[in-house]
């Protein structure tokens, strides 16, 4: 992907469904996250879907990327999601390394969600599970990836948790 070397890795996890924050907390979290990644040349990793905290992070950092507008100042917002829980995942098979146009054409369901359009990169994990059983299938791979990035680049990882449920606890663990 030819990304600039990070100086910190921010891993954001939490509510994957309806995220309800007090407006002042929402503003402070959005501003704080934007400042944290832009002033540290950080990378940010989430679950990548257009739901809950992932959509919130995408929106906050998407604004930042839009304002900067050039590839040199791009803040990488990397989504790590389970392939089978990604809406229209079948269309993404066999295209590794290629740019793809991906649009949300239907509502999210209990079994699938769309990728968030404000994320800059995606890694889709194939667990061979289908339906609701596939949710959370990316957690182990994501943890390994985050650990490897920190080790490879000699940077610290910071995990930010905003609300959540059992899947959040698995990610934190």
Image: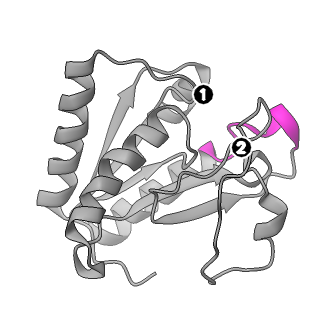
Q: Is residue 108 left or right of residue 14?
A: right
**68 versus 64 height, above or below:** below
Q: Residue at left 22%, top 63%?
A: 67
Position in image of residue 160 (x %, y %): 33, 35
Quadrant housing residue 124: bottom right
Q: Are marks 1 and 2 in contact (CB under 8 Å)?
A: no
Quadrant housing residue 95: bottom right
* Disc 1 target residue: 167
Q: Residue at left 52%, top 55%?
A: 79
Q: Residues within 10 Å of mark 2 (few under 14, many from 20)?
A: many
Let me know if residue 134 is in the magenta part.
Answer: yes
**Front one among 135 and 158:** 135
Write down the region rendered in magenta.
Answer: 130-139
**Front one among 153 and 129:** 129
Q: Residue at left 50%, top 66%?
A: 121
Q: Residue at left 21%, top 30%?
A: 27
Quick one: label 1 or label 2, which is nearer the N terminus?
Answer: 2
**Front one among 139 and 65:** 65
CA distance for labels 1 and 2: 10 Å
Residue 155 showing in the rendered view: no
Position in image of residue 30 (x %, y %): 25, 38
Q: In the rendering, which numbered label is found on residue 76?
A: none
* Disc 2 target residue: 137
**73 versus 17 height, above or below:** below
Q: Residue furthest left?
A: 39
Residue 153 showing in the rendered view: yes
Provide the secondary structure element on which disc 1 rests.
helix
């Amino acid at each position: 992907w030819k990304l600039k070397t990070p100086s910190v890795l921010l891993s954001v996890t939490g509510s994957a469904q309806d995220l309800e924050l007090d407006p002042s907390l929402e503003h402070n979290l959005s501003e704080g996250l934007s400042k944290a990644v832009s002033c540290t040349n950080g990378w940010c990793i989430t679950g990548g879907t257009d739901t809950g905290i992932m959509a919130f992070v995408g929106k906050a950092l998407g604004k930042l990327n839009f304002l900067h507008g050039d590839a040199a100042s791009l803040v990488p917002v990397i989504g790590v999601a389970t392939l089978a829980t990604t809406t229209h995942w079948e269309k993404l098979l066999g295209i590794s390394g290629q740019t793809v146009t991906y649009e949300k054409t239907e509502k999210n369901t209990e079994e699938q969600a769309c990728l968030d359009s404000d994320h800059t990169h995606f890694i889709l994990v194939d667990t061979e599970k289908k339906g609701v059983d596939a949710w959370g299938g990316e957690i182990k791979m994501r943890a390994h990836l985050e650990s490897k990035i920190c080790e490879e680049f000699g940077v610290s990882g910071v995990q930010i948790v905003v609300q959540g449920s059992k899947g959040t606890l698995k990610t934190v663990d």
